[in-house]
Amino acid sequence: MKKQLMALTLAAAMAAGLMTAPAVKADDPIKLTVWGSENDQEYLAERIEAFKAAYPDQQFDIQIGVESESTAKDTVLTDIEAAADVFAFADDQLADLVDAGALLAINEEIEPALENYAGKKIEDIKAANVPVSIEDATIGDTLYAFPTSADNGYFLYYDPEVFTEEDVKTWDGLLAAAEEKGAGKKVGMTLASGWYNAGFFYGAGFTTSRNEDGTTNCDFNGTSADGISGVDVTKAMMKIAASPAFMAIADGDISNQIASGNLCAVVSGTWDSAAVAEAFGEDYVATVLPTYMAGDKEVQMGSVGGCKLMGVNAHCEFAGWGVLLAEFLTNEESQTIHFEQCKIGPSNLVAQNSEAVAADKAISAVLQQSQFAVIQKVGGKYWDPSATFGEKIAQGQIADDDASVQAALDEAVAGITAPIE
Amino acid sequence: MKQKTNIFSIAAVGIADVARDLGSFFRAFGTAFARGDWAVKLTLLWWGAGYARRKQYIKALLMTILEALVILFTVKISLKYVPKFTTLGTVQAEKVFNMQTMKNEWNDYDNSFLILLFSLFSFVVWIVGVVIALRSVIGAYKIQQDAEAGRHVNTFREDAHRYLEDKFYITMLTPPVIGIVVFTAIPILLLIFVAFTNYDQQHMPPNALFTWVGFKNFVSLFGGGGMTITFGYSFVRVLGWTLVWAFFATFTTYIGGILLSLLLNSKLTKWPKFWRLLFVITIAVPQFVSLLLVRNFFSNGGIVNAICANIGLTGFLRNIGLISTSYIPFLTAPGWAHVTIIIINIWIGLPYQMLIDTGILMNLPQDQLESATVDGANRYQVFRYITMPYLLFVTGPSLVTDFVRNINNFNVIYLLTSGVYTTTNQALANSQAKEVDLLVTWLFTLTQDYYNYKMAAAIGIIVFLICAAFTLVAFNFMISGNKESEYQ
């Protein structure tokens, strides 16, 4: 019987051991994790030291992790509670992150923290950055993240040996010159992506928007506010795609194609500037996108303007400090240093207006193009149907009569605006 | 043994076997509980009772600790989650910011996923617990019988020793079985349960709850979802290509491997080792590296296209109307991509098959070959009646596993088509599928890009059923009877 007693005591002791919660210490350091892209690691480390120095009274324990801005959403949504407290992400992920409740709203509730410690109101942050970047970080009326850069858009790169400035003003001129002087090299652009091909529609005054339930509104199959019909826009795209000097490039293949030396002009973004310099030579030119003819109207091609944002995890334990850190990492000084170190185009108005930024060809091109850029607000259902629509144009699968074009548009828009099951 | 040719009769026999085993287990328990003394009866509640009564204190202690752990788990974890299993939680997450502490304060919210996971885990623990309890009663009764009959009752040392002797298989099998339960069985069960919930982007824990929806996901998978939801449409097409792909991928590499190894094994081939090495190099390079490279070779602006354009092939194909583009869409148009993928897969998969077949060919029963030659069989006859049946017999099971593996061959399809292939079929695009998608790559897109876990789980179950049914049938036909004796 003694042994049984022992067993019971043992079990009880184990139970007691498991049930006792660890004592909470009052002066725990403020633990925060930050995720940024591989290239930003050094920059982040430096700025986090500066952040710590700005608040000498506080005890910080800040960890930095590597997570690319383009994949942040996937990793965060896998386990929101385990994800970083502050993380950088590309603007197209904002809606999904907000839907899943992963982002802390930067609203009146949290404003006192900013005001108390950083001496800034939300209005100050809104005023310090370019309006599009704020619009980009806003859903409804609520700001959900801090803009950290405003260079996430596309524009035209070309080889000045092939084209003159006059050539690249219109798609017709661009393609004609490439055919004539390009020696077999082509003008490349991604059509099979709703991010790129929507530029034609946005330029003609068409719009997309996202509903609260995650569905998308899209009017590409109608007539735009500028009085241009979607059919005309599509026909213009088909004409461009059918040109022998045009090459439709798959979304993931652009850098590859630039490097392969098959191109003399390409629609891409700042991330390809190094590859372009290699292929077109250091004297490459980056400029706004050309115009195209929709019916008998000349339309300036639009684009999607985008930002990289820095958000705070809704499940961040020290929410107040998370917001302060995210704000600090995106303020004027940080953005200036970020540009100097990593060539990231700032969204902060003061940082943007520096001479160094103006001297950077790619970044100044994206800023130039941003006057024709729109903020793309779409739901998850937008991407596949719009990519398919572009691919059909690229492969010449739509017959060149109004009825077929209209049918293709209707079909794509039906998919884009489909309800979420 | 009687040869069974019907899958249903196999299944029926299997189920009958299990039922009989279960029946005898419960009968043994019933007898033990009815005829056992007070200690045996008490064992049902306190697992150590029967052993303690017969002075097997160490065993009693171990059983008591085990029972305590099960109870502890139940109190600490199960009671928190299992009661919410029917609803998967009702309390939505809410938070308030506290300016004093600079922290967010959350309410005690429910996490549907954790409720599902820990409920499942609890069920497994409880089932195991009940089995242990019942077995303890049976064990205790056996010891009682031994003791009453005056037979020797094993000491702990003797009992423990048996696990290294006649019960050694239990010792060896325990770790892998635990591993399978924790890492395979529970996730599969979880997947099955998720297929009956609305776990997707709109219902993602921790900030939102998901709940049971019955068979709704299967209904929409099979086309019952209305006009805009094209899952049913896509499912049939994706399934079709999955089966076509699995068939061709398996048999092209299989037959190619046999032919190649025959060629290399032939006495007429010079430097067989050198040729073999060349093929093995394909294996030595990591598959994803070679696949991504090949994808670039065959891309619309890739080197293969440049060559084809230069030699005029592209123009020729355009003239006869096979293509409408200025490039050959090797990996970007249905039909073209299907064929290219299968051909690339031959190149990737053939060397493996060749190595396996070479090994088998080297071990061909020489006596049979010799007697065949003596009997005047020509080379074709030797191949037809000796080599091929032998190869088929030995590689039969691997042929089945190859087929199943190809159904789930994620690497080849995903690496060759992701990011370059865009469907031009709007109905497929509307449910995030492509013509070249296998069920498994479609499932990946749905979970990875669209967080549509419920549909992915439903597709996963279907894939599982297809693979299970195929394996059962194929193994039944291939390994039925006693062919083995033919080669002894």
Image (cartoon, rainbow, N blue to C red):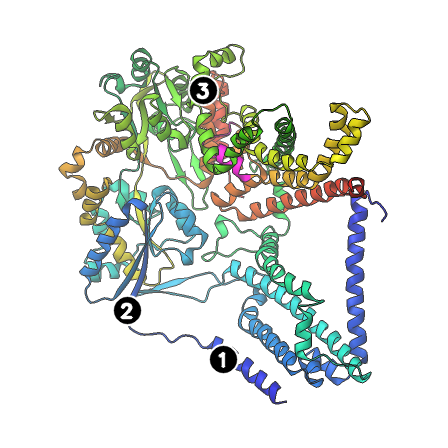
Residue beneath label 3, please? Answer: B305
First in sequence: mark 2 or mark 3? 2
Q: Is residue B418 magenta?
A: yes
Residue ID at (19%, 64%)? A56
Q: Is residue B356 magenta?
A: no
Q: Is residue B97 visible?
A: yes
Inspect the image, locate mark 3, and give the three-letter code of the amino acid beneath it.
Answer: Asn
Residue beneath label 2, please? Answer: B100
Magenta stretch bounds = B410-424
Inspect the image, locate mark 2, and give the three-letter code of the amino acid beneath it.
Answer: Gln
The furthest residue to the left:
A355
Pointers 2 and 3 in contact (CB under 8 A)?
Answer: no
Residue beneath label 1, please? Answer: A16
Q: CA distance from mark 1 to mark 3?
A: 71 Å
Q: Are marks 1 and 3 on the same chain?
A: no
Residue ID at (49%, 47%)? B451
Nearer the observer: mark 2 or 1; the answer is 1
Between A46 and A350, the one nearer to me in the picture? A46
